């Protein structure tokens, strides 16, 4: 540590940064590097064969499709929930606001078995859907339901502060200029919310892609049909196919990192606009 | 990515009463509130309530009877032990990282902040997998570890490591923006008046960040006790040895012992409720002080 360069009279720069870098490397960076080093032992042909096997491709389709659908539903309903929580005074608002974080606090395995119980054919919701020929548990719809559950807080929590900071002058001007309330909402209120809405959507999507615990119970885990990509990684591991499992994991890691980068860019842009 | 997940600076202010032209018409308010409540009730409240309903399906007696399970108690103890190691480890890291980032200027700072966030972007399953690759029988240190008769994967150390990985960013993410916003003036004053580094930290910085710290610890703890995917990969599922409470829930459920599974799950659901209550209380206390 050269105190002349940092020109800070506060002590502890070397100790705190040193500890941070060592801990970060040991816990996160080195183990993550292990995944990339593991697949370096594969030839390109072996790698592409492992990640483009029909069963793997079917799992990508399910994971991407269900995550996209869940994030889209969360974007719509999350917007409504955030708007209601910020703008409408009603008794019990605090309790409902706290409840929004439930998917962060409830262990995923618990959410998984609870959702399965609700949507199985004797369950609270399942028994009403069954006579109409709609099955949720052990189908792709079940995967979508679980991913919707875990993604909701991302959209609501990203939107809430932005709705709170909307300038009332814009809505006043719009009303003064003769727009009715619906026109104001659609043309004045909604556009500045779009960056935050997109960020929340991307976060919910990224979380859903990697989700495991809440999905495995309700999905039924049928190969080619209701098998998500993270489950396939576990299946390969249990068959001691370390290279195969890691190859799929690396594909997922790259997608996750790209999404993380995208989310960071979106947040930076949203902050500039705000 | 975590900023939506936990942010103490988020103030829950009461809605301002707006002039008529700026209020949504009654029919719209009722519709949106109806949609929001129905959605939250069916997607959030229903699963929470169903955990307790399923646990009590055969009556209170059967519910209590299901706790008479040594493997279940062992799983609970392992979950508490794991959290008791993972949370303090990430607490110390979070404070050190926030001190370095908030009090000093150095190149690569924003890269460091992004890297701290990384574990949130990684699927829990992959978080477990990478430790198997490093410490497993076929991993880097596998041969050396088995030579010295040390077990990490499929044993308690692996469970702890995977848990530390998935809960890695929680405290740091909370403290970094908080300490950046607070600046360095108070610490400068303390040092100028002759305090040493530790005195400055414990008497000046810590009182300023205690709510943020507590907030990060609550969230970190909830995730540490509830983690399923990462722990599932490294645990090896040895009953009475390497099963945490969430894994025990899975085993009972797959054996069709539904009352037992939901009874164990009800403990974890209670943990979630306590977490949400504490979290709201901290937000409230913080908003009142800084509101």
Image (cartoon, coloured by chain):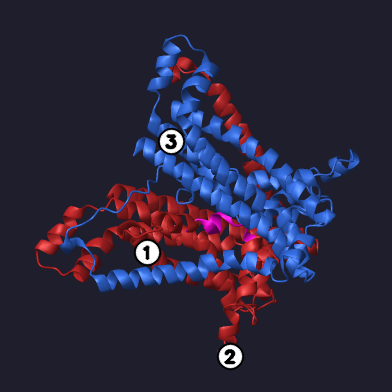
Chain colours: A red, B blue
In space, the residues marked 2 and 1 are separated at their CA atoms by 32 Å
Mark 1 is surrounded, within 10 Å at the Cα level, by few (under 14), some (14 to 19) or many (20 or more) other residues, namely: many
| Residue B76 seen anywhere in this rendered image of the structure | yes
Q: Give the left or right position of residue B155, taking residue A151 as reference.
A: right
Q: Are marks 3 and 1 on the same chain?
A: no
- Say which element carries label 1: helix
In space, the residues marked 2 and 3 are separated at their CA atoms by 53 Å
Residue A106 belongs to the span the image colors magenta = yes
Mark 2 is surrounded, within 10 Å at the Cα level, by few (under 14), some (14 to 19) or many (20 or more) other residues, namely: few
Residue B205 percent across, percent down from the top left: 47, 25
Q: Give the left or right position of residue A120, taking residue B6 as reference.
A: right
Query: Residue sitting at 44 percent across and 32 percent down?
Result: B179
Query: Residue sitting at 25 percent across and 70 percent down?
Result: B26
Which quadrant of the figure has residue B254?
A: bottom right
- Say which element carries label 2: helix
Q: Are marks 2 and 3 on the same chain?
A: no
- Say which element carries label 3: helix
Of the residues tagged 2 and 1, which is closer to the observer?
A: 2
In the rendered structure, which disc, 2 or 1, sits on the residue that comes first in sequence? 1
Residue B69 belongs to the span the image colors magenta = no
In space, the residues marked 3 and 1 are separated at their CA atoms by 27 Å
According to the picture, the residue beneath numbered tag 3 turns out to be B178
According to the picture, the residue beneath numbered tag 1 turns out to be A79
């Amino acid at each position: 540590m050269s105190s002349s360069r940092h020109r800070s009279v506060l002590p502890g720069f070397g100790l705190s940064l040193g500890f941070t870098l060592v801990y970060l490397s040991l816990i996160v960076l080195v183990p993550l590097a292990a995944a990339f080093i593991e697949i370096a032992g594969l030839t390109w042909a072996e790698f592409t064969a492992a990640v483009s096997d029909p069963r793997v491709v079917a799992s990508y389709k399910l994971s991407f499709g269900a995550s996209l659908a869940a994030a889209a539903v969360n974007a719509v309903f999350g917007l409504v929930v955030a708007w209601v929580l910020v703008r409408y005074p009603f008794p019990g608002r605090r309790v409902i606001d706290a409840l929004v974080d439930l998917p962060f606090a409830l262990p995923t395995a618990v959410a998984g078995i609870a959702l399965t119980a609700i949507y199985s054919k004797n369950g609270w919701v399942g028994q009403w859907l069954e006579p109409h020929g709609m099955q949720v548990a052990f189908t792709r719809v079940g995967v979508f339901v679980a991913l919707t559950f875990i993604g909701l807080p991302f959209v609501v929590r990203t939107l809430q502060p932005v709705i709170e900071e909307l300038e009332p002058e814009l809505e006043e001007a719009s009303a003064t200029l003769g727009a009715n309330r619906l026109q104001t909402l659609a043309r004045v209120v909604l556009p500045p919310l779009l960056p935050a809405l997109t960020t929340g959507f991307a976060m919910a999507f990224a979380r859903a892609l990697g989700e495991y615990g809440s999905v495995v119970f309700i999905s039924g885990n049928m190969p080619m049909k209701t098998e998500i990509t993270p489950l396939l990684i576990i299946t390969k591991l249990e068959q001691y196919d370390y290279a195969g499992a890691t190859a799929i994991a690396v594909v997922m890691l790259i997608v996750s990192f790209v999404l993380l980068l995208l989310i960071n860019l979106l947040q930076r842009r949203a902050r500039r606009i705000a | 990515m975590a900023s939506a997940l936990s942010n103490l600076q988020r103030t829950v202010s009461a809605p301002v009463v707006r002039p008529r032209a700026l209020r949504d018409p009654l029919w719209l308010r009722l519709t949106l509130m109806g949609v929001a409540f129905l959605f939250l009730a069916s997607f959030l409240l229903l699963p929470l309530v169903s955990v307790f309903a399923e646990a009590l399906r055969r009556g209170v007696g059967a519910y209590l009877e299901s706790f008479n399970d040594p493997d279940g108690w062992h799983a609970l103890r392992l979950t508490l032990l794991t959290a008791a190691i993972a949370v303090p480890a990430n607490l110390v890291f979070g404070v050190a990282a926030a001190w370095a980032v908030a009090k000093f200027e150095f190149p690569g700072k924003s890269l460091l902040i992004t890297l701290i966030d990384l574990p949130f972007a990684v699927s829990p399953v992959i978080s477990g997998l990478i430790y198997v690759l490093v410490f497993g029988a076929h991993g880097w240190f596998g041969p050396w570890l088995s030579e010295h008769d040390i077990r990490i994967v499929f044993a308690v150390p692996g469970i702890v490591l995977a848990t530390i990985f998935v809960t890695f960013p929680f405290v740091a993410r909370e403290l970094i923006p908080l300490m950046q916003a607070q600046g360095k003036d108070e610490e400068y004053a303390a040092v100028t008046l002759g305090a040493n580094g530790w005195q400055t930290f414990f008497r000046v910085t810590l009182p300023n960040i205690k709510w943020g710290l507590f907030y990060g610890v609550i969230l970190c703890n909830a995730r540490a006790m509830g983690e399923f995917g990462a722990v599932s990969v490294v645990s090896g599922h040895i009953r009475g040895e390497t099963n945490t409470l969430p894994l025990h829930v899975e085993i009972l459920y797959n054996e069709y012992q539904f009352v037992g599974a939901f009874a164990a799950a009800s403990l974890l659901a209670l943990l979630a409720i306590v977490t949400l209550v504490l979290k709201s209380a901290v937000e409230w206390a913080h908003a009142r002080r800084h509101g």
